[in-house]
Image (cartoon, rainbow, N blue to C red):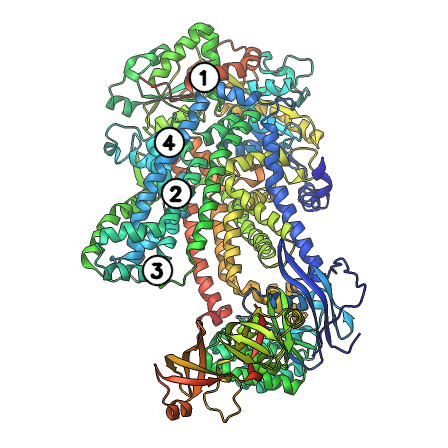
């Protein structure tokens, strides 16, 4: 067995006929910040609750710190948890909430007080100990929930959509705080989220899930730059998908044009399609990877008509029709590009689809 | 990046759930809860069912008793009578309650708060009291006898009026809840489209409270068809199913026939129960969207019209309750109208005297205390324990049964079950404990639903959080769940107390020499012709309930200020 | 029984309640249908002789006490029955629910007033006699003449003015019906009741209620029993107690030991007292006819010689036919489907 802190082996969870988790295997290293990312119903929360022992899996095993915890009740496991709803005890003060788990460990009264004060400082609410949760804002309440979860110094911190109930500005702020706190404490952390931005900005490692299976595991950069599946590509960031035909290992046909591409087709599909030319595939490219300015290093130049322009502040999102392609394509251009090249509705552009930015997926 | 690889030949192990202490305690709790309901409801009902197919010697005789029942025209007639009374009362109550509830929640009519409080009056008295009051109002020596146009109040008219009076607050409360659940934005849209008020009422108001009305209708129907007090006091020769049971058992000592009538009385109650469950499910799905609460705006014409329309209802409530109080103070109706407290000298009358009143206080107190504890704990297990669906569903379904069981049937079932010498619990027979148990079982369902609703409103993750903090679930139950649900707990306790004080039907077969109850005393005194003392005892019960209610109100304010401080403080 | 195992553990609580009451001085649970106002007086007299025996009364109307006793047949709660209709006790004797015992001085009681067995299963205490309570004020309002016979009550002038107890629940109601059937014969008796039914405003569950309703003016005439009428008249109700000339139905209040009592010695003492001269004098305060000959003194508002007016009541016949009579009665009258004309 490897040195993973948390190791999940072939986990299944069925609700009647519905398969919520299917053959999930995953290793998490000590101190890692891992995000389970996916749309609602993908099984990410089910997986988190299985790790916590709140809803047991149907099959499979979980090891934490080398110990098999697969069938232990939650109170015999070692984790702290924070929920989207905060789940703060409304009738207890902030300090009592934070001390809730400490009190049960028969910690000395003075020690409890010190620990609570320390945590209140950590979360930046040193004077709020005597307040009731409802007297705090949502973000403050979530911080208290966090403090309560780490008060007993658990080996594993589970965050179930902790930021989803907050408004955008608070969310942004708390995102950084949680990340910073996690780094400082070095506690292994799993966060469930459906927000790709949150996952990309916070995680050391992202686990993308869909329909109860893991689609891809990787660093944020890997996930974004090298999506393993069409689902990951479409779920994380924006991606244009265009129907194309595979000609050989480094050429695809898009409309009337032949495009060169250096990356092999993702997944095992590479072998099958390579042996079978003119297979229908999808060629994909992110809006920001489409270039309108280039210095002779262009690989795949295609003329395009600008159909729509959407001004988004620091950049402009355009909808284009590539010559010979029926599907509209979305491309992002900087304000400089727009000004310098006079990009407007009806303008004709010559675009480059850089070969190293093309992704190919099986149709 | 670590892709997990499964070792070759990995064998999927069958689940071996480890029972933690928490888990073990929860299972134990669920089993005890189920055992409680089985002993207090299921087994007694089984006893009554089997009694109905036995002869006097206890041999199985199939449907012989039922055939005998069908052969008896006067008994069969009671079915029609019961249905007639229930249908009439339901129509009367729902129309009046809709009017009143609408006036209370949708207008700014004058004296609204006073009227709101007055409307609840009948709930504090046993169903016998309005019936007794009607005797003084419309009986042969009644002050308003001429209003009856020569009809006798003893019979269907009297029963319908008494029961309408008694069921009225229940219906008003349900309909008011339905009315307050309506979305204000619908009315704004209607106004924006220049819809006439009447059209608005029929297209917006009525559809939105449809399920509330159906629910109220069935609550009234069940209360009416199973009530025993009113027909007993004022029914005259008009027999209904509930009085038939009493007569078969008490008058003719024919327990088998009593069991047969009980089983028959179960049918309409079960039907009403099924419809109510169906409606409840429908209603929940209606309340998904976050609705804007509707604040009535003053409108002189509408407000005063509704006020005038409500006046007769208000007058009736004041008149009926006032008459009961007055009659209890008159020395010798109608020949000596001097006021005195003679009728309150209960020790000189049939019915158990002041002792009965004190017994009732003890009984109601214990019922409120133990009932709240048992019902809330069970509701907690149903609502907050994870997994163990089978046990939780059993407990939840068990908690629903009592709603479909009329008190009289439950009481009779208790005789059959607990007085069986083979039953190890037969020591309970004749004690205050059996009265408490029976009353808890009788009123279980409504309390259970109240508790479940309150529990649903608190965060579902408290148990998960406390497990993660390694705090046993019962500590969280004690430190968090109970305090947070304190208002609901108080509501349950007061509901149990008031009903325990006023119930007749469930306990009339079960009281003994040492456990005579005041509500039964009202019945027995009226039965013996001591109507004025019966009125006096009824009034005493009503005043007690009102007193306790006021105490409860004050106490909950105090408690809210202390333990619910967090509720009122907002950032 | 399957539930036995399941519940065995839970019985402790119940057992303790029982144990608690057993610790007190000797107590007897006595089931009775005596009038409520008499209970304290009777217990006081009894305790003068037996101060260490406490009586726990269970009082209700005849029908209810009888029903209760029969319901508890398998698991009797009562030690002694003191003051219940003899017809009810005859039913219980047939069910084998009584322990025969000859109280001290039982020979002094009139033979009519005791079980004829060698060791009597029950003894009579006093007779309770039918009577009609007639409200003079209400009668004047409705121009009703004072009835003097049972037959008078069927006259059309009384239509809707008479209340009587339902024999199914009331001992008084039953003794009325039984006496009419005995006096007039079965056929004529039912015919009489058919005619009487036309005049009845309603049937009450209790035997004293018709008289109380008459006293309150709810109806001018209540068929009830003499004791109640006399009592209410004394209290100031505008009543005349009428004793119909055909004869008066009556029943005995009787006493017996319930089989299975925990304290036979105390139960016997109570039976001895119930048969004593002292007790008979005590009954005589309200009842004009008591079991011990020569004790009775005339009671106010009763006829001079009530015993002469009492019919020759065949208790055995009444008890044997009780359920048949009640069933017949119920079929005929206990339904509003018969429109009252």
Numbered disc 4: secondary structure:
helix
In this view, the residue in front, A119 or B260, is A119
Is the residue at mark 4 from the same chain as the one at mark 2?
yes
| Distance Cα–Cα, label 4 vs label 2 | 14 Å
Q: Nearer the viewer, mark 3 or mark 1?
A: 3
Residue neighbourhood size for the residue with mark 3, other residues' Cα within 10 Å, grouped as few (<14), some (14–19), many (≥20): some
Q: Mark 4 sits on what residue?
A: B84
Q: Mark 1 sits on what residue?
A: C331
Residue neighbourhood size for the residue with mark 1, other residues' Cα within 10 Å, grouped as few (<14), some (14–19), many (≥20): some
Res. B217 mark = 2
Q: Chain of mark 4?
A: B
Farthest residue to the left: give it. Answer: B301
Q: Mark 3 sits on what residue?
A: B183
In this view, the residue in front, A241 or A101, is A241
The quarter of the image holding the C terminus of chain B is bottom left
| Distance Cα–Cα, label 3 vs label 2 | 23 Å
Q: Chain of mark 1?
A: C
| Distance Cα–Cα, label 3 vs label 1 | 57 Å
In this view, the residue in front, C96 or C325, is C325
| Distance Cα–Cα, label 1 vs label 2 | 34 Å
Q: Nearer the viewer, mark 3 or mark 4?
A: 3
N-terminal of the two: label 3 or label 4? Answer: 4
Numbered disc 3: secondary structure:
loop
């Amino acid at each position: 067995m490897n040195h993973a802190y948390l190791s999940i082996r072939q986990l299944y969870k069925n609700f009647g006929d519905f398969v919520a988790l299917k053959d999930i295997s995953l290793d998490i290293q000590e101190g890692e910040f891992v995000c389970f990312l996916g749309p609602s119903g993908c099984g990410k929360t089910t997986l988190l609750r299985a790790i916590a022992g709140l809803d047991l899996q149907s099959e499979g095993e979980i090891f934490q710190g080398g110990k098999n915890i697969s069938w232990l009740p939650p109170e015999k496991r070692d984790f702290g948890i924070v929920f989207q709803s905060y789940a703060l005890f409304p009738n207890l003060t902030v300090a009592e909430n934070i001390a809730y788990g400490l009190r049960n460990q028969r910690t000395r009264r003075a020690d409890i007080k010190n620990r609570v004060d320390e945590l209140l400082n950590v979360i930046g609410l040193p004077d709020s100990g005597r307040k009731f949760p409802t007297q705090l804002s949502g973000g403050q309440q979530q911080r208290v929930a966090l403090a309560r979860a780490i008060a007993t110094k658990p080996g594993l911190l589970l965050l179930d959509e902790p930021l989803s109930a907050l408004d955008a500005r608070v969310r942004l702020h708390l995102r950084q705080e949680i990340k910073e706190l996690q780094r400082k404490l070095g506690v292994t952390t799993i966060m469930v989220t459906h927000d790709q931005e949150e996952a990309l900005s916070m995680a050391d490692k992202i686990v993308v899930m869909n329909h109860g299976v893991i689609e891809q595991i990787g660093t944020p950069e890997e996930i974004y730059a090298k999506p393993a599946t069409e689902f990951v590509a479409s779920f994380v960031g924006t991606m244009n998908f265009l129907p194309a035909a595979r000609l050989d290992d480094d050429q695809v046909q898009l409309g009337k044009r032949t495009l060169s591409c250096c990356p092999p087709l993702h997944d095992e599909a590479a072998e099958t399609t390579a042996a079978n030319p003119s297979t229908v595939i999808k060629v994909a490219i992110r809006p920001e990877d489409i270039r309108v300015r280039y210095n002779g290093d262009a690989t795949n130049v295609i003329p395009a008509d600008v159909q729509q322009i959407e001004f988004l502040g620091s950049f402009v999102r355009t909808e284009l029709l590539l010559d010979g392609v029926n599907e509209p394509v979305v491309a992002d251009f900087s304000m400089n590009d727009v000004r310098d090249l006079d990009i407007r509705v009806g303008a004709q552009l010559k675009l480059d689809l850089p070969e190293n930015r093309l992704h190919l997926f099986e149709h | 990046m670590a892709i997990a690889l499964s070792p070759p030949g990995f064998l999927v192990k069958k689940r071996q759930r480890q029972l933690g202490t928490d888990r073990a305690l929860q299972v134990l709790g669920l089993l005890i809860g189920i055992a409680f309901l089985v002993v207090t409801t299921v087994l007694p009902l089984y006893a009554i069912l089997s009694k109905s197919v036995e002869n006097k010697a206890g041999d199985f005789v199939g449907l012989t008793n039922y055939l005998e029942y069908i052969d008896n025209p006067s008994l069969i007639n009671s079915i029609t009578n019961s249905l007639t009374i229930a249908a009439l009362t339901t129509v009367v109550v729902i129309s009046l309650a809709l009017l009143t509830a609408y006036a209370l929640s949708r207008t700014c009519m004058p004296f609204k708060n006073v009227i709101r409080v007055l409307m609840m009056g009948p709930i504090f008295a046993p169903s016998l009291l309005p019936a007794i009051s009607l005797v003084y109002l419309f009986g042969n020596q009644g002050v308003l006898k001429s209003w009856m146009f020569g009809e006798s109040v003893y019979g269907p008219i009297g029963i319908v009026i008494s029961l309408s009076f008694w069921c009225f607050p229940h219906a008003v409360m349900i309909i008011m809840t339905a009315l307050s659940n309506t979305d204000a934005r619908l009315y704004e849209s209607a106004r924006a489209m220049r819809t006439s008020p009447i059209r608005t009422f029929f297209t917006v108001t009525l559809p939105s409270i449809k399920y509330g009305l159906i629910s109220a209708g069935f609550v009234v129907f069940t209360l009416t068809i199973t009530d025993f007090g009113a027909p007993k006091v004022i029914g005259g020769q008009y027999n209904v199913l509930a009085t038939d049971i009493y007569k078969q058992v008490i008058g003719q000592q024919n327990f088998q026939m009593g069991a047969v009538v009980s089983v028959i009385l179960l049918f309409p109650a079960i039907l009403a129960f099924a419809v109510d469950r169906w409606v409840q499910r429908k209603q929940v799905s209606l309340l998904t969207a976050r609705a804007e609460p509707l604040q009535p705006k003053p409108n002189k014409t509408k407000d005063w019209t509704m006020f005038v329309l409500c006046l007769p209802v208000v007058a009736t409530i004041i008149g009926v309750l006032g008459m009961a109080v007055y009659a209890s103070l008159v020395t010798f109706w109608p020949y000596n109208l001097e006021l005195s407290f003679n009728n309150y000298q209960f020790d000189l009358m049939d019915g158990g005297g002041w002792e009965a009143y004190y017994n009732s206080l003890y009984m109601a107190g214990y019922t409120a205390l133990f009932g709240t504890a048992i019902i809330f704990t069970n509701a907690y297990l149903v609502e907050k324990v994870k997994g163990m669906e089978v046990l939780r569903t059993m407990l939840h379904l068990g908690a629903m049964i009592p709603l479909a069981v009329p008190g009289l049937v439950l009481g009779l079932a208790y005789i059959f079950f607990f007085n069986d010498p083979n039953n190890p619990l037969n020591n309970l027979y004749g004690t205050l404990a059996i009265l408490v148990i029976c009353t808890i079982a009788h009123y279980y369902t409504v309390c259970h639903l109240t508790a479940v609703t309150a529990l649903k409103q608190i965060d579902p993750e408290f148990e998960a959080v406390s497990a993660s903090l390694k705090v046993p679930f019962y500590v969280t139950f004690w430190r968090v769940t109970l305090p947070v649900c304190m208002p609901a707990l108080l509501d349950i306790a007061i509901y149990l107390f008031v009903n325990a004080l006023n119930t007749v039907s469930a306990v009339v077969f079960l009281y003994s020499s040492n456990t005579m109850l005041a509500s039964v005393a009202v019945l027995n005194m009226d039965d013996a012709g001591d109507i004025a003392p019966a009125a006096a005892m009824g009034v005493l019960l009503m005043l007690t309930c009102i007193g306790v209610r006021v105490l409860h109100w004050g106490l909950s304010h105090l408690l809210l200020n202390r333990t619910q401080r967090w509720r009122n403080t907002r950032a | 029984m399957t539930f036995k195992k399941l519940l065995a553990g839970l019985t402790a609580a119940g057992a303790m309640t029982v144990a608690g009451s057993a610790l007190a001085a000797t107590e007897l649970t006595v089931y009775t249908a005596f009038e409520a106002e008499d209970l304290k007086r009777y217990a006081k007299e009894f305790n003068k002789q037996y101060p260490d025996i406490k009586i726990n009364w269970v009082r209700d109307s005849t029908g209810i006490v009888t029903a209760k006793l029969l319901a508890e047949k398998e698991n009797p709660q009562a030690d002694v029955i003191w003051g219940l209709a003899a017809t009810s006790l005859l039913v219980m004797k047939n069910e084998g629910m009584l322990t025969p015992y000859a109280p001290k001085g039982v020979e002094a009681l009139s033979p009519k007033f005791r079980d004829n067995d060698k060791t009597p299963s029950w003894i009579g205490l006093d007779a309770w006699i039918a009577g009609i309570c007639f409200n003079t004020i209400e009668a004047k309002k409705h121009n009703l003449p004072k009835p003097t016979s049972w037959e008078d009550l069927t006259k059309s002038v009384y239509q809707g003015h008479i209340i009587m107890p339902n024999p199914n629940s009331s001992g008084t109601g039953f003794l009325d019906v039984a006496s009419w059937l005995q006096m007039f014969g079965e056929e004529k008796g039912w015919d009489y009741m058919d005619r009487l039914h036309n005049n009845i405003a309603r049937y009450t569950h209790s035997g004293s209620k018709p008289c109380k309703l008459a006293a309150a003016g709810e109806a001018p005439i209540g068929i009830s029993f003499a004791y109640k009428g006399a009592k209410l008249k004394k209290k100031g109700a505008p009543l005349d107690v009428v004793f119909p000339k055909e004869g008066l139905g009556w029943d005995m209040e009787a006493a017996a030991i319930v089989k299975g009592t925990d304290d036979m010695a105390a139960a016997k003492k109570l039976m001895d007292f119930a048969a004593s001269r002292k007790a008979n004098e005590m009954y005589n305060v309200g009842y004009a006819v008591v079991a011990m000959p020569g004790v009775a003194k005339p009671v106010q508002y009763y006829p001079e010689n009530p015993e002469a007016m009492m019919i020759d009541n065949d208790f055995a016949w009444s008890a044997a036919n009780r359920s048949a009579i009640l069933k017949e009665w119920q079929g005929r009258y206990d339904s509003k489907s018969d429109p009252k004309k």
